[in-house]
Image (spheres, helix red, strand yellow):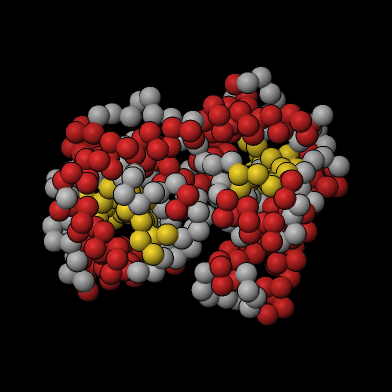
Amino acid sequence: MSGIWPPDVGGPASHAPDVASYLQARGHDVEVVTTADAPPEQRSYPVRAVPRHLAKGVRHYRGAALVHHRARENDVVYTTGMFGRSALGSSLARTPYVVKLTADPAFERSRRTGLVGGNVDEFQRGGGGVAAAALRLARDVELRRAAHVFCPSTYLRELAIGWGVAPALVSVLPNPVPPLDDVPARGELQRRFGLNGATIAFAGRLTAQKSLGRALEAVARADGVQLVIAGEGPDRGPLETRAHELGVDGRVRFLGPLPRERVVELFRAADATILSSSWENFPHTVVEALAVGTPVLAMEAGGVGEVVRDGVNGLLVPAGDTDALGDAVRRYFTDRELRERLRAAAASSVAEYAPERVFGELERKLLELAG
């Protein structure tokens, strides 16, 4: 189960198809349940979708009903989203379900609906009134009933345990590196993207979480450095305005949303990638960038520091410190020896995240629970 699916852009939309393809190649029967704006393209396994244009209550009912119907025909359910619908449908079908937890769902919903501001760590201390409390309760029940919970980072595992999930049922399983067999050479990709000179790349949803205004300010303090942004979201207009206010609109390009393959190519073409998020777990994009040999300049939020190691495969600065991020950008592009050292270590730093190892561990747990 996945709340998003290609052509949607985001971590679950990359992860779910990779898992489905891996499991099918290993001889397992696989099917997918998701939500979609239009009927999704069918693959070598069935992809069933609930239309997003339905009213929220109807959409949620249809989703839970579809999960229940399909769970009765399968041995185990693996969900990367739609946690409430997956938990309800699987429980009614008496089929064990495994959760891939990518964030605090109660915080994400509370933030999206304006119940709270701030970041995920502040949310753990309360706030948001009765509505947010209800979302916290629903989150706790859904996760405690899961047969197992996988978290990409130790940071998120500790949060889940704090919500009352038994420690023995929560394990860390990092996001795997993407397929790299067909990625062209860096010089060819620089020509394709029109990159000329010092370039930083970002890819992801343009939302408050990503705090890209900080990235714009950091670039504004580094003469001659360009920023290429792939993605779409509600903050695009304000970000374009902010780039103009900072006088860097000539050095900032908005490419719009790109499929995952093109994002990986953009990362390989760039000199570095940047992450200025206010809160994070363990972003797919960090692993993707490092896998193609591109260092990451990041703020230390959530589990980012578990993969980006300062002075080893990137530069890490305190969360929310825009001045420090600007200094890191300047330092990176004025110190050639540093750039070469970080680039040389980037790919090997995520070698342990090979898909065969990550998905192999997931497969073993699903088989165990399937009985």
Name which quarter of the figure residue 233 lies in.
bottom left
Q: Position of residue 300 (x, y in %)?
A: 42, 59
Judged left or right of residue 55, residue 254 is: left
Q: Quadrant of the C terminus?
A: top right
Is 323 located above or below residue 32 in the figure? below
Q: How many marks?
A: 0
Please report the residue visible at 77 percent of the width from the left and 44 percent of the height from the top.
147
In the image, taking residue 355 as reference, residue 265 lies left or right, namely: left
Please tell me which residue is depicted at 74% across the width and 55% down the height of the picture: 165
Figure quadrant of residue 291: top left
Viewer-nearest residue: 25 or 169: 169
Q: In the picture provided, is 224 more to the left or to the right than 150?
A: left
Q: Nearer the viewer, residue 327 or 32?
A: 327
Where residue 163 sits in the image (x, y, percent)? 71, 61
Measured from the top left, where is residue 307 in percent x and y?
A: 44, 46
Q: In the rendered image, is residue 151 in sight?
A: yes
Identify the image quadrant of the N terminus. Answer: top right
Residue 368: image x %, image y %?
A: 76, 30
Asked whether residue 256 is in view, the answer is: no
The quarter of the picture where residue 298 lies is bottom left
Q: Residue at x 60, y 76 (%)?
A: 115
Q: Is 351 left or right of 1, judged from the image as shown? A: left
